[in-house]
Structures are given as structure tokens and as C-alpha cells.
Amino acid sequence: MRVLLIATYELGHQPLHLASPAAALQAAGHEVVCRDLTVEPWQIALIDTVDAVAFSVPMHTAMRLAVQAARAVRSRRPELPICLYGLYAPVSRDTIVGTVADRVIAGEYEAALVGWVDGLAGGDALASEAAALIELGRAESVLPARRLLPPLDRYARAVVGEEERLVGYVEATHGCAHTCRHCPVPTVYGGRVRLVQREAVLADVEQLVAVGGRHITFGDPDFLNGWRHALRTVEEMHGRFPSLTFDCTVKVEHILRHAEVWPRLAAAGCVFVVSALECVNDRILGLLDKGHTAADAARAVQIVRDAGITLRPSFMPFTPWTSASDIMELLDFVAAHDLIGNVDPVQYTIRLLVPEGSWLLDVPELAVHLDGYDAEALTWRWRSADPAMDRLQRELAQLVERHHADGAPLERVVSEIRSAAARAAGLDEPVTALPAGSIEGRPRLTEPWFC
């Protein structure tokens, strides 16, 4: 069969979640065409030449865009089999399965995706029936078919020192051992972790280096879920490619638990780590079941910094329980720990998502704030205990988007964010200049609009 695989957004990276299933489908004897709508135009006429189409949906933004595109496909060719696969595939399944898509697959999706296409090719009636699957079985990894994708220079770069480096995206593990209530990963993996064979990861890194990659992003939900596996992988990678740098994502709890590994990660080429601090209100962190406190976050920043690695926090400052003082305390934390230049301004605008199946729905304190499920937005609607916080979130989102489009300097954006938050808190703070050295030279990716 001729299969069209489509990505709508993978955080500014060349889409691994096209390349990996494409290789699996090709190994099964199918012809594969890939399109990444992040960098390639949406040419709906492509569907006239294929036998099935599947959309990669590893995150909320990708799922919303994929649903729109899938509806366009369904309108043009109602008989064409459509699949949504990836972490967000099961969201809103009651309104999607059988209408927008015939099959949704989450978890370790490659084998199930190949099985679906094999069934369609063989005329298996079950393959044509609408179904939603969560697959967690273990499978041998295949070398991702990156030759089917746009080149690395179409994607985000890593800024390291005075240079920009082409970035390759890989994953050493899937799933997560932790069950933070607001995270979509536990709803699929339920606290399980699946290791990707080390040689498979390194073979993929090798082909990325061969096409110009000089920095690797490890996109695991938490790189230290399998810390021995992670450490062996990057140390062997460093042995083969000594000039290669990398970044990864690690929760505060693991930064503290594995404090001794950070000098080794730095020696292997780690230049920055993303960590979901979320907020600095311990009560809210407890409701989210984050497993850390604000004091823990401060210690984590220092542990990573002492190893010579930059910590780039991600935040979720707006929840139903957030107050104006919480926002000011978050900004104070960022300034006090010299993180101003480490935070992409969009992080000050993030609002809690409560998708279908979210474990937060089991938290009694949330129920009073809910205002119905929005199947189009793929999230439960909620309102803040303080309506001023909903207004502030909208104001900051518009401010950051406007300044991003204008290319405004970071110091101006941060100053305006702080002024808006101060007004919401009823404070009359003077605008002060940022401390010297607080924004310069921090390693980062050039794509700030991540989940």
C-alpha cells in the first residue's frame, strides 16, 4: 500500500514520529510518503494518490492541527482510511473515532500502525473497523527513515556560544515512571517506561551527524527515568562524536536524586537541561503531584549550574488556584536564581490543559472550577478562582506573541510582563533594568514555542 504520513508540529524539530513509523512501514513492504506541515505546504491533492493516511500527534498542538487536516481529507475522500497515532491520539476519542479517523493508536504505536496497514492491504475486515488502541508492548527499533524528511536546516537550531548548530531529535526512552496529574504521559503509559535500544539510538545519531547535525535533543519525557541507560548512551555518543553537544529534559526530583551524574553529563556534551518547575507555590505543586517543592527547585538549579550546565525552566504559571502574588513570586524566583536569560517568555503565559482522561479530573479541588469539555479545543474549560488571573493570562499571551513577532529584546519583554503582573497584584513597582549578564550567552534552541 502507498501510505501518507503527516506531521503538523514536533516542537520545531525534524519529526522523528514520521521517520520511525515510515521505516517500520517500509520494512513491511509498503510505500511511504512523508509531509511535515510545519515546513512544507499542505497539498491536499497528495491524498488522491495514496491508499491510507496517518497523522502524527505527539502533543496537544499537533493533535488540534491534525484534526483540522483530517477533516479536510475526509471531506475530499470519504472512503480513505485515516489514522491518528501518538501520545494525544486518544483525546476526544468519542467524537473522533469513526468520524474524523478510523483508527487511533497511542503508546508504542509502530507495530499497531503496521498491522493496521497490513490489514487494509490484505482486505481484513477488522482493519476497516473504527477502533482506539493503546499499545505498550516492547518492539525492536528500526533506523528512522530520515531521508524522507526535509533537511535539518529547515528546523530549529541550538545556540551554543557564538554559533548556531543544526539539531537532531532522538528519544532514548518512551513513557515516564512518574505520574504527575497534569501530564498526558501517565494517561497512556500509566507509570511505565520503555527503553529504546542503545545501539538504535546511536545509529540514528550517526545518520544525523552525517547530514550536518552538531547538537542532539533527547526528547524523552524524562531522560533520567532510565539513568544508567541514558548515561551509557551519551557517554558512548561522546566517544564517537566528541564535538557533539546535547540537551535533555529531567524533572526536579531526578536532578536531586541523581546529583552525582551531572558532571558526567556535562563531560559528555550536555549544555542545557529543560526542567518543568511549573510554579513556586507548594500547594499547587502538591495538587499537580509534581514530587518537588520550590526549595527543591532552587537546589536543582544549583546542582545543574555547579556542573557547568544551564537549566532552562518550563513553567505552568496559570492554574485555577493561581493568585497574582503567585505570579510575582515566580518572577522573583527567576530573578533571584539568575534565570531571566534561561526562560523563554512564552513560559510566563502557559495555562493548564485538562485533556480528556487527565488524572487531574480525580482531584476534588478542580471540580468547582470546571466549565464543560471543549471537544474542539481538546480540553476541559476551567475558570480561575480569581477572574483577574484569566484576564492577566490573556494579556500576557498577547504581549508575548506581539513582541515575538516584532523581535523585541528579552529585557523589554520581561519588564512588561513584570509590570502587568504587578498591576494585577495591586502593586506599583518601578520598572528597573535587568542585572548585567542576566540574559547573555545562555544556550538554547531557536524554537521557543514548545509545549
Image (tube, rainbow, N blue to C red):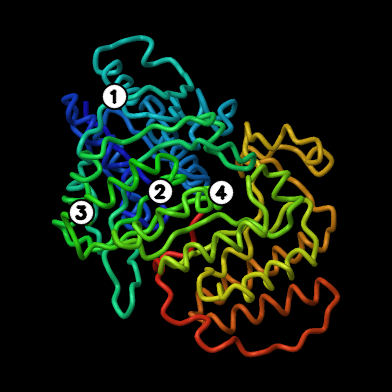
Q: Give the residue at mark 4.
A: 253
Amino acid under label 2?
Thr
Q: Which mark is residue 208?
A: 3
Callout in the foreground (2, 3): 3
Amino acid under label 3?
Leu
Q: Give the residue at mark 2.
A: 8
Q: Secondary structure at mark 3?
A: helix
What's the residue at 24%, 62% (across, down)?
244
Amino acid under label 1?
Val
Q: Which mark is residue 114?
A: 1
| Discs 2, 3 touching: Cβ within 8 Å | no
- Disc 4 crowd, CA 10 A, few/some/many (<14, 14-19, 20+): some
Percent of width and height locating residue 60: 53, 45
Pick whichever, 366 or 122, lies toward us: 366
Residue 154 visible: no
- The quarter of the picture where the N terminus appears is top left
Q: Is residue 186 left or right of residue 241?
A: right
- Disc 1 crowd, CA 10 A, few/some/many (<14, 14-19, 20+): many
What's the residue at 66%, 50% (across, down)?
352
Q: How far, Cα to Cα, is label 2 from label 3?
A: 21 Å
| Discs 4, 3 touching: Cβ within 8 Å | no
Choose the circle earlier in sequence order: 4 or 3.
3
